[in-house]
Amino acid sequence: MTTTMTLQMQNSLLQVKNLVQHFELPLSWMDRCLRRERRFVHAVNGVSFEIGPGEVFSLVGESGCGKSTIARTVVRLLTPRSGEIVFEGREIGRLKARELRPIRREIQMVFQNPYASLDPRQRVGEILMEPLLFHGIAGSREEALERMFRLMDITGLHRDQANRYPHQFSGGQRQRIGIARALATGPKLIVADEPVSALDVSIQAQILNLMMDLREEFHLSYLFISHNLAVVRHVTDRVGIMYLGFIVEQAGCDDIFEHPLHPYTKALLDAAPSVDKDHIEAPLSGEVPSPLTLPPGCVFASRCPKREKLCDEERPPLKKNGSREVACHFVE
Ligand SMILES: Nc1ncnc2c1ncn2[C@@H]1O[C@H](COP(=O)(O)OP(=O)(O)OP(=O)(O)O)[C@@H](O)[C@H]1O
Ligand SMILES: [Mg+2]
């Protein structure tokens, strides 16, 4: 192993290597009668990226390209079909529930819909004290109480709101509770899956600023997922552009936004002024292939303005191009 590679590995907090995640579709009674073969949704097809300490890495792409599947696999709500998830030098992709317990303290998740992810029957104080007691972070209920109030302070909630239930808060306040709960265990990495897309535009900036202040204060790293390119540009160090379960381009934020190389990245940026919707829709003609049967060549070929015969025959690998990586036969 070269010195550069060793250094790179030492500097990574998280390394995702060739991650593959497929979902088997259940066979119906009719399928079984007709002896149809098992079918798999190819949600993530060999994705690799790294996140350094204190770094924000974003995944961007159209609906269904596999962003949430990666998020759920990294926090080990799912077990990878293949590939590795290396956290602080340790492979965690195959760890069993008990072995995962200390890792769950270090990697926390913030969800898109804080209302659905908070127990409606628990008061905010209880929601925040639970992880402190469960992970043995606080030795006593008094200590947990003090830590709980401190979490409320740093996320901009008022201490006298600890008695309230989630439905008694606004959307922005609920996301503050979700962030406070994620911080309770003192994580190093937060996986944030569309953390502001359910919020009013005026509140989005407040929550993003809070997340970035916390990044500074606690030296947090984020795996940040968003369909909103303006949001991504505001918070990110590096970006991975996803298409049909593949990363097609990966680079620093300025490189992606100022000099996109992959035809799909260019199309996404062209669509940017109109992406103030639920999901990105690139202004491209042609069908997106089904994730049930991936084409043998480039997965983007059916919509690519640069398509040639080679694109349908051979899948382009993600090639290093200086400090960036691009998967296209026609980008040098
Ligand atoms: N539990 C599941 N069973 C079967 N298919 C699934 C499952 N979860 C996700 N998928 C499929 O995997 C693919 C990737 O889904 P995923 O939710 O990761 O996309 P996404 O990029 O997060 O989309 P969105 O932007 O809409 O949130 C989709 O085709 C989806 O239908
Ligand atoms: Mg998603």
Image: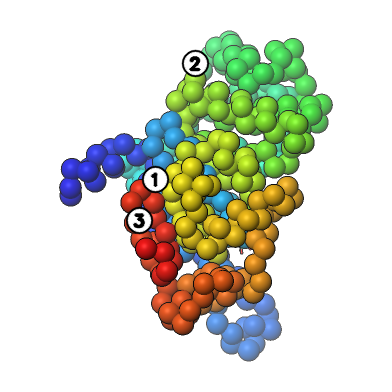
Answer few, some or many: residues within 10 Å of disc 3's Cα (few below 14, many 20 plus, some between 14 and 19): few
The dot on residue 321 is: 3
Q: Are marks 3 and 1 in contact (CB under 8 Å)?
A: no
User: Residue 305's x, y, as percent?
Assistant: 56, 71
Indicate the amino acid at tag 1.
Answer: Glu
Label whose residue precedes the other's in the sequence (3 or 1): 1
Label whose residue precedes the other's in the sequence (1 or 2): 1
Residue furthest to the front:
258
| Above or below: residue 212 compared with residue 78 | above
Residue furthest to the left:
2
User: Residue 247's x, y, as percent?
Assistant: 47, 58
Indicate the amino acid at tag 2.
Answer: Gly
Q: Secondary structure beneath disc 3? A: strand
Give the Cα distance between marks 1 and 2.
Answer: 35 Å
Q: Are marks 3 and 2 in contact (CB under 8 Å)?
A: no
- Residue at mark 1: 50
Indicate the amino acid at tag 3.
Answer: Asn
Can you tell which of label 3 and label 1 is closer to the viewer?
A: 3
Q: Secondary structure beneath disc 2? A: loop
Label whose residue precedes the other's in the sequence (3 or 2): 2
Q: Are marks 1 and 2 in contact (CB under 8 Å)?
A: no
| Image-based side of 90 in relation to 44, left or right | left
Give the Cα distance between marks 3 and 1.
Answer: 17 Å
Q: Nearer the viewer, residue 129 or 278?
A: 278
Q: Nearer the viewer, residue 278 or 108?
A: 278
**Residue at (52%, 38%) from the top-left corner?**
236
**Residue at (49%, 43%) from the top-left corner?**
253
| Image-based side of 184 in relation to 228, left or right | left
Answer few, some or many: residues within 10 Å of disc 2's Cα (few below 14, many 20 plus, some between 14 and 19): few
The dot on residue 198 is: none
Give the Cα distance between marks 3 and 2.
Answer: 51 Å
- Residue at mark 2: 139
